[in-house]
Image: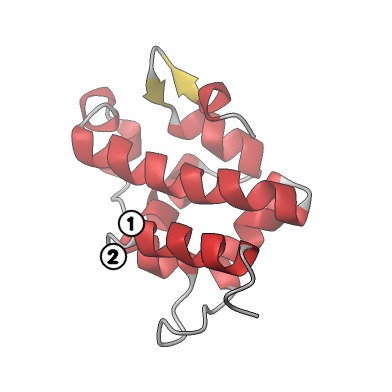
Amino acid sequence: MGLAQYADDGFFAPRKIAQALRTTSEEVARTAGLGRDAVQRKDRVRSDRTQRRLREMMEVLNKLEPRFGSALMAYAWYRSEPLPGFSGQTAMQLVRSGRAEDVLDYIDAVDAGVHA
């Protein structure tokens, strides 16, 4: 999953992300911790906050895809699997609360064999 394929004119495009994940733009917004307006209004889609949240979500999914074999399986894990050491929160919940870096660090630690 190359990140560039989810962009239009250098900005993450919720519509392209939704297409790849077989969901709706509104669901992409919710999954990234954004309101519906953030993905419907062009000025909001290009805002720093919206782009940062979409980028963080896609960075996590991009790192997970090779492990799960598909973007859809990575997305399912991202949304539903509680992470040990994070009070049972999922990667999605952590990203929504601004903790994407913690999720990426956790994935790196698992890959390095630190967490089993």
| Image quadrant in which you'd find residue 50 | top left
Mark 1 neighbour density, 10 Å: few (under 14) some (14–19) many (20 or more)? many
> Quadrant location of the C terminus?
bottom right
Q: Are marks 2 and 1 in contact (CB under 8 Å)?
A: yes
Callout 2, which amino acid? Ser
- In the image, residue 113 sits, relative to residue 65, either above or below, namely below
Camera-nearest residue between 37 and 3: 3
Which residue does the image show at 39% across and 52% down from the upper left?
A: 32
- In the image, residue 94 sits, relative to residue 62, either above or below, namely below
Relative to 75, 51 lies left or right: left
> Quadrant location of the N terminus?
top right
Image coordinates of residue 70 in percent, x first then y, are: 75, 47
Callout 1, which amino acid? Gly
- In the image, residue 10 sits, relative to residue 47, either above or below, namely above
Image coordinates of residue 18 in percent, x first then y, are: 55, 39
Secondary element at tag 2 = loop
Disc 1 target residue = 33
Which residue does the image show at 58% across and 48% down from the upper left?
A: 63
Which mark lies nearer to you, 2 or 1?
2
Camera-nearest residue between 112 and 20: 112
Residue at the bottom extreme?
A: 87
Image coordinates of residue 96 in percent, x first then y, are: 34, 61
Residue at the top extreme?
A: 9
Residue 45's tag is: none
Image coordinates of residue 23 in percent, x first then y, are: 59, 46
Real-space Cα separation, disc 2 to disc 1, in angstroms:
7 Å
Disc 2 target residue = 97
